[in-house]
Amino acid sequence: MASAYHLLIVSGVISMSTMEMRLTHLMLALFLLFARKPKTPALKGNRIAQGVEAVLIGAALLASIWLLSRWKAIAFSGGMTNQQDYWAGLVIVVLVFEAARRGIGLILAAITLTFFIYPFVSPMLPGILNGRGYGLERVVTFLTTDTQGIYGIPIGVAATYIVTFTIFGALLSRLGAGDFFFEIFFRLTRGMRAASAKSAVLFSSLIGMVSGSAAGNVAVTGTLTIPLMKREGYQPHEAAAVEAVASTGGQIMPQVMGAAAFIMAEVVGVSYTEVMATGLLPALLFFTTAFIVVHLRAVRSKIEPVTARSTDPRSTARVLWDGMPFIVAFVLLLGMMLLGYSPFKASLWAIVAMIAVTVLWTRRLDRKLIGRIAGAVTEGASNVVTISAACAAAGIIAGVLGLTGLGSKIAVLIDLGSGSNLVIALVLTMVVSIILGMGLPTTAAYLILATVVAPALVKMGVPVLTAHFFVFYFG
């Protein structure tokens, strides 16, 4: 239902303002997250835990509905709020912390909490970190009634771009795109040394173009490529490492590049097509390097070429013909974005085209196909829930930076720490990005880095898009 609702908004069937869309999106995301993820796995099914979940879900719905009923009055009055707005906002802030903990992990929740506490302790901090301080009501109302806080750009991106692309990726998986692409690349690399590993690299690059998720990429490609690599002579840990590296690269491979790339386009203020064009060459270099490395490791390990034939009896031409729904969807998606259409419009029409061509090619629209389509739509909503939790948490960080001016202070700290030397500043930024990247998913790590660190690089003379790509890659 949540996915269908978002698709209707993107298609223009349901018309609503930006703030209404963001409010309802986070409300649905919190509802799904608390309904599907228990407080701890050990409490799943526990009656007391279920009661807590019901309270959290009820609180999310009531607070969101109140803010939905009040946002116009607040906006038209120039930001005037009342006590009820504060209490509703406080509920949302608390729920976002819990959603970040459940959806992403304790690290993101702790980082967000650290920034949230800053306005209250800033008068007691020394030097450049010293600030005037703010009360809890001022901070909460700013974070929940202004578009610079929780309901800022990240949540807006999650409600439009990310939802449609996660549904697109889920639909590809459900309709068999993984098997199609694997079969094509298996035939292309047959007879080569390390054929299975090279298939994994090529396969991951293409699947990564639409999944944009390292974990999702492994789930689709790893089940096919890892057993083949082991049969070819790779040790289990080597096969897993090849797949992990190749799948991680899917996050930087246009045209989807994961949720972080959509957020980057909005934050930087450029078209997503420009982000894709900028990221293409580094992504190709990444996969070319991975392709060469697996070959050199195969030579060192004396893995001989395998000429085993595919178990699929179809000819290559027939495989391509049967995979036409996926080819059409890819071409349409990329073509529309290059022509200037918005990414969510392009992905929506790619979804429609893939379903239509699948029906034409198979000449059936039976219960099984409808079930796959419905399953993909449901999976798309499930996949975006944790991303939305990360986006909302990042909104708290961005709101605190905007309210207190902490962002410019951090830029000064980086400048002082590097002695105004750009190379040293980049090295420091790289280290911070890598550390955050080890503890957080890509989207969450990028959101924090883009909010806190990237502006500091920009103030030191680094072009905006370059600075964001720098923290994106290392994160």
Image (cartoon, rainbow, N blue to C red):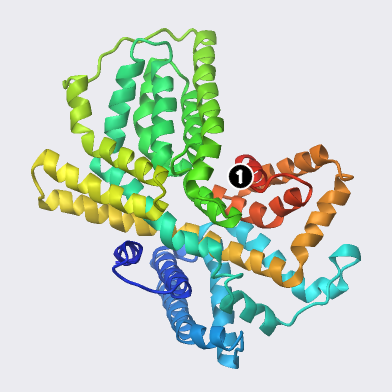
Q: Residue at left 43%, top 69%?
A: 25
Residue placed most toward the observer, 87 or 251:
251
Instruction: Please give the residue where the numbered disc 1 appears in the rendered image.
Output: 472
Could you tell whether 420 is left or right of 237 in the image? right
Q: Position of residue 144 (x, y in %)?
A: 57, 77
Could you tell whether 340 is left or right of 79 in the image? left
Could you tell whether 149 is left or right of 315 in the image? right
- Which element is circle 1 on? helix
Q: Is residue 388 above or below residue 175?
A: below
Residue pushed farthest bottom?
83
Could you tell whether 65 is left or right of 413 in the image? left
State which quadrant residue 407 falls in: bottom right
Q: Position of residue 177 (x, y in %)?
A: 28, 37
User: Number of labelled discs?
Assistant: 1
Amino acid type of the residue tagged 1 in the rendering: Phe
State which quadrant residue 217 falls in: top left
**Residue 41 makes an appearance in the image:** no
